[in-house]
DNA sequence: GTCTATATTGCGATAGAC
DNA sequence: GTCTATCGCAATATAGAC
């Protein structure tokens, strides 16, 4: 293997294997073998197995920063909800491993949860809660809606579609062609749900 | 330790430890030590570490069968949604470990996912989709709502509240005293969201 | 930068005494 | 039914050659 192509390949296979079986479910033997390199390359490039996991995690969660650009571009609350939904669908489509790290860290947090995961999740929730609060101020959303709780409900609806896909593959199509239809369904449910009468 | 009190104690500590760190994150040494017994008791009572994990899983997911009683007792679609929400809150409150096994199995499925987990999840989704379809037939919900997708959205809203609790403990109260308020918020968002105009 | 070989620790499972 | 002791193996990490 040439130069530090080894580095890239390790990150690639680690992303898949860690996402499928978690930090403890994969050995550095299997990782190095799947990457077509030797076991010592993990320590050399990433310090340790946990160092490799941490590098994967950082790569996975980098896309959450995009929420800031969206917030800057979109001012209308309803448009913000629609943008969030479409962005979230695209995020999961562009990166089929993301949700596994996301939920795996939420339910069985590793040492990196507090520094790498929780901050970016909170940022998104806070920004969406702000958008919803703005909708309430504009009297387009009901005054008795709790912005943070509504933001969680919104995130829950869309993320659960991907979270449950393993269990519901026989009940509903998960084809990307349905995505825009689903965005509109969730948008309709949510905006009518929190909308002023 | 007397008689097969050992059995009970092992199940108890295994439930906590497996929920926190997953099947691969806990060793039988640690399990037996935490249970105040010896390592060989796991093989003796449960065959293997995986056998113990399987026993825990069955115990955890037994409560999902309660959905059948609810369905039998409640005929009104809106009432069914409210009953589902309250039942789900109670399920998570009665058993703080349930959601971890639930999502851990969804994202990093073990050998038991297909037989122990997926069937009970699907049952709940199917029953709720039936209730929503009935609401559409009664023209109380909109005709353009997809029942299965709406059932997933409903499940997503409420489950995500618990799923994200580790990340959002600084953003929103997770005290049980708020539960009824949250049930009403989710009920309002969902029924208005899918409701006929 | 990458390999092979190895040191060391911890794993799951079980044999055999009681 | 429960224990101690141990087997065989796989784990992470690293030393040292190239």
Image (tube, coloured by chain):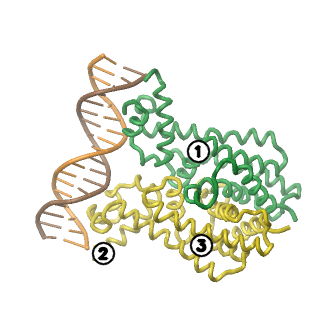
Chain colours: A green, B yellow, C brown, D orange
State the separation of the CA atoms marked 3 and 2: 30 Å
Label 1 secondary element: loop
Which image quadrant for residue B136?
bottom right
Local crowd at mark 3 within 10 Å, few (<14), some, or many (≥20)? some
Foreground disc of the pair 1, 2: 1
Asked whether B29 or B54 is in front, the reply is: B54
Q: What residue is drawn where x is 27% and y is 63%?
A: B38
**Which label was assigned to residue B144?**
none
Asked whether B37 or B89 is in front, the reply is: B89
Q: Which residue is mark 2?
A: B4
Local crowd at mark 2 within 10 Å, few (<14), some, or many (≥20)? few
- Image coordinates for residue B23, horizontal then vertical, percent: 41, 56
Is C16 displayed left or right of B39 in the figure? left
Asked whether A145 or A195 is in front, the reply is: A195
Is B19 displayed left or right of B175 in the figure? left
Please say whether residue B48 is visible from this viewpoint: yes
Asked whether A120 or B159 is in front, the reply is: B159
| Both marks 1 and 2 on one chain | no
Q: Which residue is mark 3?
A: B90
Label 2 secondary element: loop
Q: From the image, which quarter does the N terminus of chain B lie in?
A: bottom left
């Amino acid at each position: 293997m040439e130069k530090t192509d080894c580095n890239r390949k390790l990150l690639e296979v680690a992303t898949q294997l860690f996402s499928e079986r978690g930090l403890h479910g994969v050995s550095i033997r299997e990782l190095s073998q799947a990457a077509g390199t030797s076991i010592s390359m993990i320590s050399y490039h990433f310090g340790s197995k946990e160092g490799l996991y941490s590098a994967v995690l950082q790569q996975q969660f980098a896309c959450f920063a995009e929420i800031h650009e969206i917030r800057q571009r979109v001012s209308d609350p309803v448009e913000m909800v629609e943008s969030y939904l479409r962005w979230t669908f695209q995020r999961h489509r562009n990166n089929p491993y993301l949700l596994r790290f996301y939920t795996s860290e939420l339910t069985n947090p590793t040492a990196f949860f507090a520094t790498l995961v929780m901050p970016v999740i909170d940022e998104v929730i806070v920004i969406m809660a702000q958008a919803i609060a703005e909708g309430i101020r504009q009297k387009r959303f009901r005054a008795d809606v709790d912005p943070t709780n509504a933001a969680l409900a919104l995130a829950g609806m869309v993320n659960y579609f991907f979270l449950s896909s393993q269990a519901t593959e026989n009940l509903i199509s998960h084809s990307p062609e349905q995505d825009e239809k689903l965005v509109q369904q969730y948008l309709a449910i949510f905006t009518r749900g929190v909308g002023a009468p």
